[in-house]
Amino acid sequence: MFEALGDKLQGIFRSLRGQGTLTEAHVDAALREIRLALLEADVHFKVVKQFLERVRAKAIGQEVLKSLSPDQAVLRIVRDEMVALLGGDEPKALQLANRIPSVVLMTGLQGSGKTTTSAKLARFLKQGGKHPLLVSTDVYRPAAREQLKTVGEKAGLKVHHPEGGDPLALLRSALTEARAIGHDVLVVDTAGRLHIDDELMAELAALKALADPTEILYVADAMTGQDAVTSAMAFQQKVGITGIVLTKLDGDARGGAALSAAAVTGCPVKFAGLGERVESFEAFDPGRMVGRILGMGDVLGLIERVEESVDRDQAEAMVRKLRRSEFTLEDYRDQIRQMRRMGKLDEVLAMIPGVKGAMKGVDVDQGEREMTRAAAIIDSMTRVERRDPTVINGSRRKRIAKGSGTRVEDVNRLLRNFVQTRKAMKQMMGMGGGMKAMKRMAARMPQFGR
């Protein structure tokens, strides 16, 4: 989502890199470009003005002007101010009470992704050891309650779903069940509207009074531009939100509204939805997000994704196989699947410092397709062929290509890549995991744009 903004800001810092020393004129020129980049990214103009004033006050200090690396000095200031804009260096944890249940009200306009986000949050809490209960009080939108029930139960979550009832009766019933069974968190999916009106706000105020929630989260669609800012301000003034959840961060929005919503409400962004799947949800870390925007990567985020996606026992078994030269096409396929579980390839690459710029012009989508094609080809082989590819002759290659919907050339390329990958991995094991061997191995994985 922040790709365009990130590209512009990185270009500005590259222009500073050629300066031997930094002058106020250089700072002013860079700030003009940063102003344009932020406005084009849909950041609210008042937020841009305040942001640039803070950056300039720090950037014209003697320590920065005399810095041997002007681009790094300004980059650090911009990074720190953007992090402050989004709520500070540390992620803001969800506030839960000692009583049962802690109630989290999910608010926002219709179409922001509130229902799916409610299920995502409940799953996130369950993964963290909580025992959440979901309930929808949206009796207005057709099938809204059924949607939450379907999404929630598919994710293995308990959903309170009695027949009929008005919003207050549904909430009261859910509170009773939570206390009786011992659900420590109740996530309430409230009704939305296409616009803000007095009826909506009155209902939310009544739900708030009944539930005494520990958190009131505003679900903001990152695709809505400045409307997200206006709506967030209205909800903050009339209901009192405690945090923001950004949805559709995997979309094509320019991203500025996300930066603005936190600034104008004074509420931190607490969570981010990164895709349609219920597991595509994470605690929002301002430092990591800004690092991605500015091309500084997110190594900690990458490590966390690897730990979540890679089976430790399977990884240790693969190491043993490599040492015994028993790495097969089945193992190769498993490695591809684990890579796919880490998320979209461009998201993973953006987490590696310096890679985003180096990948400019590379067709990452083609890389995704190549991995899918490689897995399909291996799936079309027999077990004997997967374990001993030397038996794959011309007729077998034709059969495999036909079964996987690919060409014989694709099968040949996969087999070549597999042989070279196995050789590189074996060399890496012998070298103790040297960087050169790792690069050779990466070069032989399903190739970009080939």
Image (cartoon, helix red, strand yellow):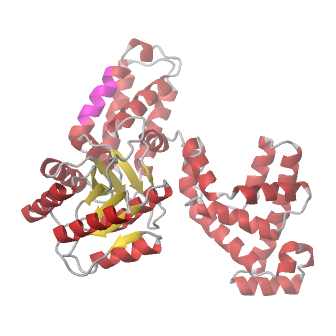
Q: 36 above or below 308?
A: above
Q: Give the image location of residue 37, x and y in percent.
A: 35, 42
Q: Give the image location of residue 115, x and y in percent.
A: 32, 68
Q: Give the image location of residue 429, x and y in percent.
A: 85, 48
* Total numbered circles: 0
Q: Main secondary structure of the magenta part?
A: helix
User: Which quadrant holds residue 62?
Assistant: top left
Q: 52 above or below 24?
A: below
User: Which quadrant holds residue 120?
Assistant: bottom left
Q: Residue at x 22, y 42 (%)?
A: 264
Q: Nearer the viewer, residue 107 or 65?
A: 107
Say which quadrant the C terminus sits in: bottom right
Quick check: can you spot residue 328?
A: yes
Q: Give the image location of residue 152, x and y in percent.
A: 40, 71
Q: Nearer the viewer, residue 130 or 29?
A: 130
Q: 60 above or below 396?
A: above
**373 left or right of 273?**
right
Q: 32 above or below 58?
A: below
The stretch in magenta equals 49-57
User: Which quadrant holds residue 190?
Assistant: bottom left
Quick check: can you spot residue 42?
A: no
**101 left or right of 374?**
left
**145 left or right of 18?**
left
Q: Residue at x 62, y 52 (%)?
A: 307
Q: Does residue 16 show up magenta in the picture?
A: no
Say which quadrant the N terminus sits in: bottom left
Q: Does residue 50 show up magenta in the picture?
A: yes
